[in-house]
Amino acid sequence: MTIIFLKNIGRFIFLILFQVLILNNIQFSGYINPYFYIYFILLLPFETPRWLLLLSAFLLGISLDAFTNTYGLNASACVLMAFVRPFVISAISTGTEFMIGHSPSLKNQGMKWFAYYSILLVLIHHFALFYLEIFRFNEFFQTLLRVLLSSVFTLLLIFLAEYLSYPTEK
Amino acid sequence: MRYLLYFLRKQYIYFLFLALEAISLLILFNSNDYQSNAMTRVSNGVTGSVLNISNNISEYFSLRRVNSILAEDNAKLHSNRSEAFYKADTESFYHNDTLYKLEYRYISAKVINNSTNKRNNFIMLNKGYRQGIENHMGVIMGDRIVGQVVSVSDHFCWVMSLLNKDSRISGKFKKNDQLVNIEWSGGNYQVGEVKEIPKHVVIHKGDTIITSGNSDIFPEGLLIGTIDQYTVAEEENFNYATIRFATDFNSLSFVEVLIDMMRKEKENLKNSFKSSEK
């Protein structure tokens, strides 16, 4: 139990630093900003109580906000994402029992399950984030393009991380 | 009452969600009043030191370019020294200090965090209250504008870059002093929008736009950029153009914060005018 706890705290710090020091400095174009740090919320264990899910998502968002001077922006998107996570899990559940202490992963849940899970949650987060950031409707389609392009890159990073952390056994 | 408590207990997760969302949105939409925001002052210390470390490393990669900018500036300053002027008449050549009262002071600051890929971009500098920086001060690089200070802690400050949806710069055509507004609409960080160009102004590609000096933030005559493309709108009252910024926001490393020595006086004058109007 303590190990899972420490592992998640370590992941929290690593992902925030990775986002702030590396991803935020990469310039693809004005339209692509991957937000890989939400990988933390995706990877929280299945039996995490919902209040802890919400609180840790809030902490994650507000910590990132402190680095980019956008207080509340990432926090609200993360809280929304953490709130819908249990609904998404039950909606796409395959009926198989999830093991205690396990995090959602590509290896344990399979490609199809993990793809649905991550695509839905990443899209929800990015929609909330980019539309709150601009908060006007006259740039609706520009923002939509940003949401879609950034989601693709965030998902690429997530799948890359999944393949790197769980090498396929032969 | 018991049922209410029971209801709250059963549905507490929804209330927690709504409470956390409400907190984040309140912070997000009230964050314009940065100075009263105690959170910024505390967290700037932490985030500032982390970003400072990362900048100490990445700084080395831009040294060559910074050097050439400094050399250019040096040459410009040398040519302004009194030794550089030819004294035609030794009798009447003098420099009277009472005529030239210092209006702007410049504080050099290092950029330790910067972005150009977001819709709202901010820049963090390594100078704060201790060095005399306050809110609403202008930030420039050489003779080009960069942005305005929006939040200050003891040793650091955040600057709202021109690349922000809340940024609106009052500018004018250098050739005929016609006033325009400059904004940025996201996407390419090198190109902005010039709005409200009066119909009678003839626009050419390459026209220079400078600051108008109408706002309290920037003095007159700082370079904003040059006209890139323009459209003549038939049915509207104003024409519209895009502007290519003179500042390269993606390669900022050292900037200067403008301290207006007469700001108090200007504000007092403005306030007295406002109160007499009522």
Image (tube, coloured by chain):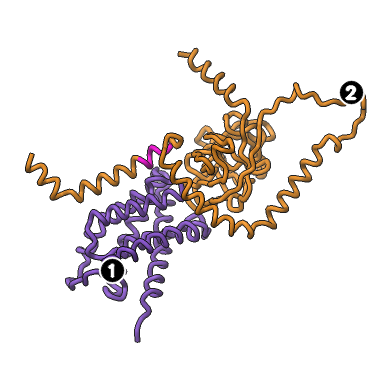
Chain colours: A purple, B orange
In the image, what residue occupies the spot 61% across and 44% down?
Answer: B109
Q: Which quadrant does the C terminus of chain A fall into? A: bottom left
Tag shown at residue A153: none
Q: Secondary structure at mark 1?
A: loop
Give the overall secondary structure of the magenta segment. helix
For label 2, the SS is loop
| Residue B110 appears in the rendering | yes
Q: Residue B115: x percent and y percent?
A: 52, 51
Rate crowding at label 2 as few (under 14), some (14 to 19) or many (20 or more) other CA atoms within 10 Å. Answer: few
Whether residue B226 can be seen here: no
Q: Nearer the viewer, residue B211 or A144?
A: B211
Badge 2 is on which residue? B92
Residue toward you, A11 or B211: A11
Tag 1 subunit: A
Please provide percent x and percent y for residue A23: 48, 60
What amino acid is found at the position of numbered circle 2 in the picture? Ser
Reply yes or no: does residue B35 show up in magenta. Answer: no
Magenta range: B27-32
Q: Amino acid at mark 1?
A: Pro
Whether B51 is drawn above or below B220: the answer is below
Residue under the image location 36 percent in, 41 percent down: B27
Q: Residue at the spot x=89%, y=23% of the render?
A: B92
Query: Does residue A74 appear to the left or right of B249 in the view shown?
Result: left
Find disc 1 in the rendering and name its residue: A104
